[in-house]
Image (cartoon, helix red, strand yellow):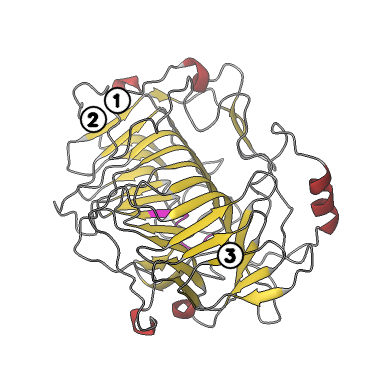
Amino acid sequence: MKRLILSVAVIALAASACKKNADKNFNARGTQAGALALPEKTIPSIVSSDLVLSNDTLWLLDGKVYVNNGATLVIQEGARVEGIKKATNAESSALIVTRGSQLFAVGNPDQPIVFSAHVDANNPSLEPGDWGGIVLLGKATVNKTEPTIEGIDLPTIPAGVDVHYGGSDDADNSGNLQYVRIEYAGAAIATDNELNGLTCGGVGCGTVLDFIESAYGADDAFEFFGGTVNAKHLYALAPNDDAFDFDNGYRGSVQFAVSQLRAELSYSANPNGIECDNDATGSNDQPITKPQISNMTVIGLETATQAIPLWNAAYFRRNSKFNVKNSIFMGFPTGLNHESVNTDKNFSHNLITAFTTVVTPAGFPIVTGCGNAATDLIFTSGLNAPFASTPDYRPAAGSQAVTAGTDFSCFSGICEAGFIQSVSYRGAFDATNNWLAGWAKYDY
């Protein structure tokens, strides 16, 4: 599915002259490729000392780029970084920040930082998987011993570069990503060996992840392999596989996140809104994966026919634990699939609907003191316009999202103190504030 790049110089200039209204559409088009005809520079394949990428240059990733040796990579607001399409997935361009190194990519609503694929004679139009994505590797706890991150062809790694992740520092800091878009990323070098839009391996809760969009990826939008990093304001748009994937002992918190699929695209053999495993075999290796999730909105497709190829809005399996509250799940054949045998799981104060099966297996184990499935409601009164050409994910007047009540007890992330905010609504948005406005993009 090819996507032509449009010239948007006029829009980019207009955006600099007037601030977008937060209640208007969020389809940001400033920072498109070619809009400002910037000079191009290629980032070195190994960044071993501190480097700043300015916003007056188009920065290119030509293959894998490793931030290594404790270096810090800083990207200015409004900058654009593009990955050159390579001949094979194993060669895919990607930005990998190794343990002890840091990435600071802090944009703002009017000047997001954009990571995308590069358009040239060999790649005249864009499609999912044109480049690999962003990988952050940290020193926080995982449930494997010195694992290597997936999606990288190990024999090709340069000498002196380490792509292991994990450790014992749950407060480890891999940097700060805010107001960032990641477009057309993802690369599979083998089954279950893929790069995602944003891959986090053992990332600690000293890291800031806030206001990040991962769009049109060839695998997952966001995947967390262990670690304790918290994240807010995530937007997963039309990933080929899962929107939010948690594995290998992840124990952080996610609040205010939204995902949506697009009917005109094809998807993997098993796409889910959430996919959560303790590990690939369902072992009892410690720490057990247990994401803390609040105010998430997971949206599949509009009709039952469109949704036939999809799997679950939320899929918890392979001995994982979970705590999911104050969220909305819709547009999938199955709403909640909690086949994990682990009994430490809570799914309460949510709104859920599905085309075939709302919850499977039927019944739900109660977690003492943390509510239970009886506080979940079938979602009947919904969102403003989630399937419109410019969607609006905010609750409609009288929606259960604002009338059904919320509960913020029992969140137990490793770095939980003060992170999860108590709000009066379920789902990722309140009735007035569209936090996607100005920086995020829907119409690709």
Report the label total.
Answer: 3
User: Between 408 and 67, which is closer to the camera in this rendering?
Assistant: 67
Q: Secondary structure at mark 2?
A: loop
Q: Secondary structure at mark 1?
A: helix
Relative to 62, 143 lies left or right: left
Q: In which quadrant of the rendered image does the C terminus lie?
A: bottom right
Q: In which quadrant of the rendered image does the N terminus lie?
A: bottom right
Q: Amino acid at mark 1?
A: Ala
Residue 411 lies, with reference to residue 389, above or below; the image says above
Q: For residue 80, which quarter of the picture? A: bottom right
Residue 338 lies, with reference to residue 31, above or below; the image says above
Q: Pointers 2 and 3 in contact (CB under 8 A)?
A: no
Q: Which residue is mark 3?
A: 52
Q: Which residue is mark 2?
A: 364
Residue under the point 42% across and 71% down: 188
Give the alpha-carbon distance from disc 2 to disc 3, as whole Å: 51 Å
Q: Residues within 10 Å of mark 2 (few under 14, many from 20)?
A: some
Mark linked to residue 160: none
Q: Position of residue 402 (x, y in %)?
A: 51, 19
Residues shaded magenta: 217-223
Residue 394 lies, with reference to residue 184, above or below; the image says above
